[in-house]
Image (spheres, rainbow, N blue to C red):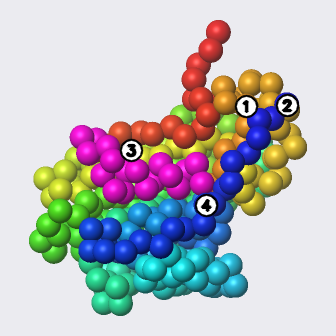
């Protein structure tokens, strides 16, 4: 049997005082699921939050209101990150509204529209996956990194860039090949930024989620649940929840692991472990 699931998103606890004012976090893909959980967790930790997403709907504005209920400033910005033309201006607009960015969480990403044979992948579907997950994230990170470096290091405030990739950055799934390729490339990009930005006091991290119960995995929930429950796919016999990822992001963003940059954090219940 699957073990009991924890709450996916804890209610944010209002924070007060200058000690917990950590600056601004930009969260891409922040309107629901893992993104919303990250926004809530960062708000509870003392960040103001800019919620960036390609979809402007009630869920997006609900996320903003949840952040505000924690006593933090928040705003929603509609953006398709595959459109890289005016990234510097877009980042400048957010900073003009909320102040200096101290944390970027690259969470936005898309999955293959139809899982299928690697030999049937089209140029159009490949370009779309890579355009959002890898190219879009790379150039948005570049724009935010430039904005961070253009400002003096903000005293004792931690600065970080955290990218959510996937267990598929290392685990092969030929039925969703372009997705795996995009996430593997994003993993290397994260390590490249870690080296480039270390002297600027900006730590760069990668989180690889395992099987997380969200809308994106709804189509395979039944398929994988038996394997999760048996321990075949996950040493911890349950599906991960968005809050599991969010807590990891918060720990890294607040400097709980200060002597780390360029590292890969697996949050998947042991999914990445090789066993005989």
Residue 216 falls in image quadrant: bottom right
Q: Nearer the viewer, residue 47 or 175?
A: 47
Quarter location, residue 188: top left
Q: Which residue is mark 4?
A: 10
Circle 2/circle 1 CB separation < 8 Å: yes
- 3 or 2: mark nearer the eye: 2
Drawn side of residue 27 relative to residue 140, left or right: right
Q: Position of residue 63 (x, y in %)?
A: 60, 77
Q: Is residue 267 above or below residue 123?
A: above
Q: Which residue is mark 3?
A: 188
Q: Secondary structure at mark 1?
A: loop
Q: Where is mark 1, residue-wise?
A: 237
Q: Which stretch is magenta?
A: 243-260
Q: Is residue 92 magenta?
A: no
Along the polypeptide, which appears first: circle 3 or circle 2?
Answer: 2
Q: Which residue is mark 2?
A: 1
> Percent from the top left, x then y, of residue 178?
62, 49
Q: Earlier in the sequence, mark 1 or mark 4?
A: 4
Q: Residues within 10 Å of mark 4 (few under 14, many from 20)?
A: few
Q: Comparing marks 1 and 3, which lies closer to the viewer?
A: 1
Picture quarter with the N terminus:
top right
Count of all numbered marks drawn on residues in the image: 4
Estimate the spatial distance between the alpha carbons at disc 2 and disc 4, rounded to whole Å: 24 Å
Mark 2 or mark 1, which has the lower sequence index?
A: 2
Q: Is residue 82 visible?
A: no
Q: Earlier in the sequence, mark 1 or mark 3?
A: 3
Is label 2 or label 4 in front? 4
Instruction: Tell me the SS state at disc 3.
Output: helix
Determine the residue positioned at 16% across, 74% down.
150
Q: Looking at the picture, tell me which residue is in the foreground, 45 or 63.
A: 45
> Within the magenta stretch, is there residue 244?
yes
Toward the viewer: 118 or 17? 17
């Amino acid at each position: 049997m699957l073990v009991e699931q924890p709450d996916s998103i804890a209610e944010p606890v209002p924070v007060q005082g200058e000690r917990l004012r950590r600056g601004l976090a930009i969260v891409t893909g922040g309107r629901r699921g893992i993104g919303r959980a990250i926004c809530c967790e960062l708000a509870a930790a003392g960040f103001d939050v800019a919620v960036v997403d390609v979809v402007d709907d009630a869920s997006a504005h609900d996320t903003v209101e949840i952040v505000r209920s924690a006593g933090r400033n928040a705003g929603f910005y509609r953006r398709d990150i595959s459109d890289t033309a005016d990234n510097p201006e877009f980042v400048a607009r957010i900073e003009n509204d909320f102040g200096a960015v101290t944390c970027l969480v690259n969470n936005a990403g898309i999955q293959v529209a139809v899982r299928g044979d690697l030999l049937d992948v089209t140029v159009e579907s490949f370009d779309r996956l890579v355009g959002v997950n890898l190219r879009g994230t790379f150039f948005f990170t570049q724009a935010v990194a430039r904005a961070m470096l253009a400002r003096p290091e903000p005293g004792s405030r931690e600065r970080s860039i955290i990218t959510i990739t996937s267990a598929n950055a290392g685990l092969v799934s030929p039925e969703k090949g372009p997705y795996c390729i995009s996430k593997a490339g994003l993993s290397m990009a994260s390590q490249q930024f870690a080296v480039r930005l270390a002297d600027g006091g900006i730590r760069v991290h990668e989180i690889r989620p395992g099987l997380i119960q969200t809308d994106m995995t709804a189509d395979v929930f039944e398929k994988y649940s038996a394997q999760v429950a048996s321990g075949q796919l996950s040493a911890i016999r349950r599906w991960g929840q968005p809050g599991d990822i969010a807590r990891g992001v918060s720990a890294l963003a607040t400097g709980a692991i200060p002597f780390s940059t360029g590292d890969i954090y697996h949050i998947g219940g042991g999914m990445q472990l090789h066993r005989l």
